[in-house]
Image (cartoon, rainbow, N blue to C red):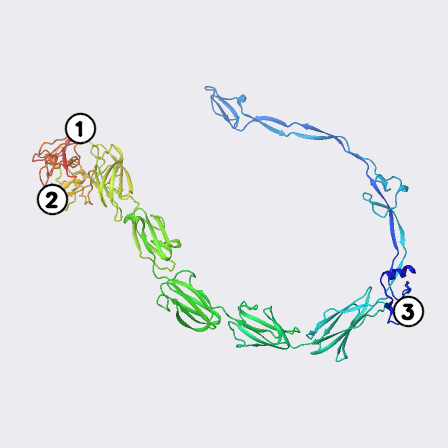
């Protein structure tokens, strides 16, 4: 008993714990109050203190003995065989060895199998491997039970096992267990009263506020009580079975008193406490100082509450006030007090926490939304804009010029162009206004001027390629070449380089380039000519296998024929669209050779065309048997004959074929292109004339020669230049008889040679006999034609004369 009393004293229990509950014990006797298992103040029975002890063991496995093994190695099993393509065959006569895919190859006689020379390979039939052989199998010895004795070794006898309160590590098997009492059962009594506390004292509350009471005790609380009094009389009463109690103040506005206490589980009563409070259920009033419900750039409000306004919140953001009956909040605008653009909500609170009805208001400090109906940010020939503002668009100004609108939420300003609504070429500023005066400003560019196009490097009118520099202050967008679009990178300056046929839509000949800026304005069309094609080479009628003539044409839009190369030798020409290469035969200045030759014609830009042609040595002609059977050569219409020249300044047909550069009646040179230094303008070839009643066609195997009939007989001989090795310079030797179609101002060889500064050129002696005699071809290398008047018509290739002409 003394032990229990001491225990009670140690717990700090006071004799006053029973005071006021009808206890008959005096204070001096309370200190020895009896606390037993049947005491009414018993709060706890302390159980006796005991412990358990156990004995432990472990099983030691018998020793394990591993198997005794050894490894036996087995070598790979292989055989040799003939490799693919390795069967050897030997030729008896030469000893040559060839390898084939099969030994059954049948090469014919003279070959035999030579197995000793076969190419062999090793084939693995079975791979090498190792085999493990067990000599002695593995085995385990019997297990042993060992008991824990407090020493690591333990004992195999159960009698030696120790009683312990813990499970020793490594000894998992519990063998036996017993319980030992250390301290007997004890008792604790409660003589101390509980304490009840108001957790949230609040002097001014709203209806519905809840007061929280908490009762605490050393052991257990049985009840908590809270009563509300008004004007000294009980108004409401609340209690709970436990230490927590909520007392709701669902009361009319006014002053009240809360009284509260608690009771523990053994009947001890807490001291009663009181708390005075006021209930306020009336919210503040909020008055818009401007036009209630109307949107504004800013707002101000008047606030009132009989028990003082405490604060306001705008969109949940708190602004504290000075806690007065009257208060204000002024100049509310986006970014201030939590206000935002558009819809806002204001709530006012008094000191009791009553909230006013939410006051919604709209702040509008944003100008109308402006949307470019076209390509935003890019220049345009004209511009149109869509305008939107929830509070209605009022007007726009363009460069300060006002255009009034119809005050709608949606509006438009269309077809703005220079001179309209104040707009100008170049940069413009548009400002849109809503009805509150909010503005939005944008800049835009009007552009009605197309780009400028400049040809780079001053390229000639006709060229192999062109490059262009493009400029537009509002960005070049693209170009079209013959309608084919090439997109550009939209810069102020841009380039289109190396325009050539097949690139960017360009073609051979005439082309048209147009540049466009971002606004769609087009530049003036720039026309240019591209020439990457060499002159056309056409064999002329009258050309033969022994004497070739070609017509050159560089086209209407070409850069003009500039020269030719014959077998690599260059002959520059004066630049004309048309030109001729005549008298391509053996033994003259052209340097042609018997068989295949190459003719390259090039224009002023270096474009080339190459053809190959063949030239045959002149065939020997049989002597004519009847001189009267030759057909008479008639002059061509217009007074031009086969051997003469017309009055129009063109070279005569025969002159063109012989490569002669003749003087016309006016004294001007008419270049025929037959010689190395010139060419003729386009000619009308005379129709072929049959001499002696025969028409000779061009052989089909003579190369690229025209298939129309050509002149034969004496005319062919007359068209052959004299060999330059044989020159007769006696006066009058090269003067042909004058006749119809013959040049009227022929000069003698002596006269031409006597002229200083002249250039030698080989010319053919022409005769104008109306009925030329046939050439005697019985003499090799020599042909002579004699007219009835005794004049010399032509000499063969073995005889020639030389004359000079002005360069």
Residue 579 occupies which quadrant of the picture? top left
Counting other residues with Cα less than 10 Å from the Cα at mark 3, is it few (<14), some (14-19), or many (20 or more)? few
Q: Label 2: which residue?
A: 665
Separation of residues labelled 1 and 2 (CA atoms): 38 Å
Residue 218 occupies which quadrant of the picture? bottom right
Counting other residues with Cα less than 10 Å from the Cα at mark 2, is it few (<14), some (14-19), or many (20 or more)? some
Separation of residues labelled 2 and 3 (CA atoms): 174 Å
Residue 182 spot, x, y in % from top left: 89, 53
Foreground pick, 403 / 672: 403
Q: Label 3: which residue?
A: 26
Mark 2 and mark 3 lie on one chain; the one further toward the N terminus is 3
Nearer the camera: disc 1 or disc 2: 2
Mark 1 and mark 2 lie on one chain; the one further toward the N terminus is 2
Residue at the far right in the pictured view? 1
Q: Is residue 658 left or right of residue 234?
A: left
Residue 764 spot, x, y in % from top left: 15, 36
Residue 616 spot, x, y in % from top left: 23, 33
Task: Label 1: state its secondary structure.
Answer: loop
* On screen, residue 461 above or below 274: above
Q: Label 1: which residue?
A: 780
Name the disc covering residue 160, or none.
none
Regarding residue 362, the answer to whether it shows in the image is yes
Residue 574 occupies which quadrant of the picture? top left
Separation of residues labelled 3 and 1 (CA atoms): 180 Å
């Amino acid at each position: 008993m003394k032990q229990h009393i001491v225990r009670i004293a140690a717990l700090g229990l006071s004799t006053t714990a029973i005071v006021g509950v009808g206890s008959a014990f005096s204070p001096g006797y309370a200190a020895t109050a009896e606390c037993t298992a049947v005491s009414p103040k018993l709060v706890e029975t302390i159980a006796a203190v005991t412990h358990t002890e156990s004995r432990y063991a472990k099983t030691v496995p018998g020793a394990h003995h591993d198997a005794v093994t050894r490894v036996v190695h087995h070598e790979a099993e292989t055989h040799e065989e003939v490799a693919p393509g390795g069967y050897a065959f030997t030729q008896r006569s030469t000893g040559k060895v060839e390898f084939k895919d099969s030994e059954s190859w049948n090469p014919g006689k003279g070959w035999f199998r030579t197995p000793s020379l076969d190419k062999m390979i090793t084939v693995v039939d079975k791979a090498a491997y190792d085999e493990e052989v067990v000599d002695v199998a593995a085995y385990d010895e019997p297990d042993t039970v060992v008991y824990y004795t407090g020493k690591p070794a333990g004992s195999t006898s159960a009698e030696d096992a120790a009683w312990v309160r813990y499970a020793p590590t490594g000894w998992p098997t519990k063998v036996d267990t017993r319980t030992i009492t250390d301290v007997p059962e004890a008792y604790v009594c409660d003589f101390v009263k509980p304490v009840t506390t108001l957790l949230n004292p609040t002097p001014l509350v709203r209806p519905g506020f809840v007061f929280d009471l908490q009762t605490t005790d050393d052991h257990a609380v049985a009840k908590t009580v809270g009563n509300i009094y008004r004007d000294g009389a009980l108004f409401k009463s609340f209690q709970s079975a436990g230490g927590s109690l909520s007392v709701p103040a669902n009361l009319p506005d006014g002053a009240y008193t809360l009284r509260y206490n608690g009771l523990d589980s053994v009947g001890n009563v807490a001291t009663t406490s009181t708390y005075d409070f006021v209930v306020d259920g009336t919210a503040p009033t909020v008055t818009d100082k401007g036009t209630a419900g109307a949107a504004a750039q800013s707002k101000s409000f008047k606030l009132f509450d009989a028990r003082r306004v405490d604060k306001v919140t705008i969109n949940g953001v708190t602004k504290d006030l000075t806690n007065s009956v009257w208060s204000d909040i002024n100049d509310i605008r986006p970014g201030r007090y939590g206000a935002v653009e558009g819809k806002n909500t204001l709530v006012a609170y008094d000191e009791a926490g009553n909230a006013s009805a939410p006051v919604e208001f709209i702040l509008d400090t944003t100008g109308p939304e402006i949307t470019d109906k076209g390509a935003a940010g890019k220049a345009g020939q004209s511009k149109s804009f869509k305008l939107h503002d929830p509070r209605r668009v009022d007007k726009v100004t363009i460069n300060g010029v006002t255009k009034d609108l119809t005050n709608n939420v949606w509006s438009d300003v269309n077809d703005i162009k220079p001179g309209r609504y104040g707009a100008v070429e170049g940069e413009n500023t548009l400002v849109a206004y809503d009805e509150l005066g909010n503005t939005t400003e944008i800049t835009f560019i009007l552009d009605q001027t197309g780009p400028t196009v400049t040809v780079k490097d001053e390229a000639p009118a006709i060229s192999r390629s062109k490059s262009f520099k493009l400029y537009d202050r509002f960005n070049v967008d693209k170009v079209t070449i013959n309608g084919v679009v090439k997109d550009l990178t939209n810069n102020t300056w841009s380039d289109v380089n190396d325009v050539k046929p097949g690139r960017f839509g360009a073609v051979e000949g005439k082309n048209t380039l147009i540049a466009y800026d971002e606004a769609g304005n087009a530049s003036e069309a720039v026309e240019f000519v591209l020439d990457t094609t060499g002159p056309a080479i056409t064999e002329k009628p009258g050309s033969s296998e022994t004497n070739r003539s070609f017509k050159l044409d560089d086209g209407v839009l070409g850069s003009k024929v500039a020269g030719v190369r014959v077998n690599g030798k260059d002959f520059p020409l004066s630049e004309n669209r048309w030109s001729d290469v005549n008298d391509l035969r053996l033994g003259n200045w052209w340097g042609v050779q018997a068989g295949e030759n190459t003719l390259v014609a090039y224009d002023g830009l270096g474009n080339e065309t190459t053809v190959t042609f063949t030239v045959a040595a002149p065939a020997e002609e049989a002597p004519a048997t009847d001189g009267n059977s030759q057909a008479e050569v008639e002059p061509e219409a217009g007074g031009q004959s086969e051997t003469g020249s017309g009055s129009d300044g063109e070279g005569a047909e025969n002159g063109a074929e012989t490569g002669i550069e003749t003087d016309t009646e006016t004294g001007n040179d008419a270049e025929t292109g037959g010689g190395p230094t010139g060419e003729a303008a386009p000619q009308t070839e005379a129709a072929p004339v049959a001499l002696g009643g025969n028409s000779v066609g061009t052989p089909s195997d003579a190369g690229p020669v025209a298939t129309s009939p050509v002149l034969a007989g004496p005319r062919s001989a007359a068209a052959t230049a004299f060999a330059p090795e044989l020159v007769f310079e006696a006066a009058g030797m090269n003067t042909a008889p004058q006749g119809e179609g013959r040049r009227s101002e022929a000069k003698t060889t002596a006269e031409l040679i006597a002229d200083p500064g002249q250039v030698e050129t080989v010319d053919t002696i022409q005769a104008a006999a109306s009925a030329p005699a046939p050439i005697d071809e019985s003499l090799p290398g020599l042909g002579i034609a004699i007219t009835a008047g005794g004049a010399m018509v032509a000499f063969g290739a073995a005889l020639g004369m030389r004359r000079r002409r002005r360069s």
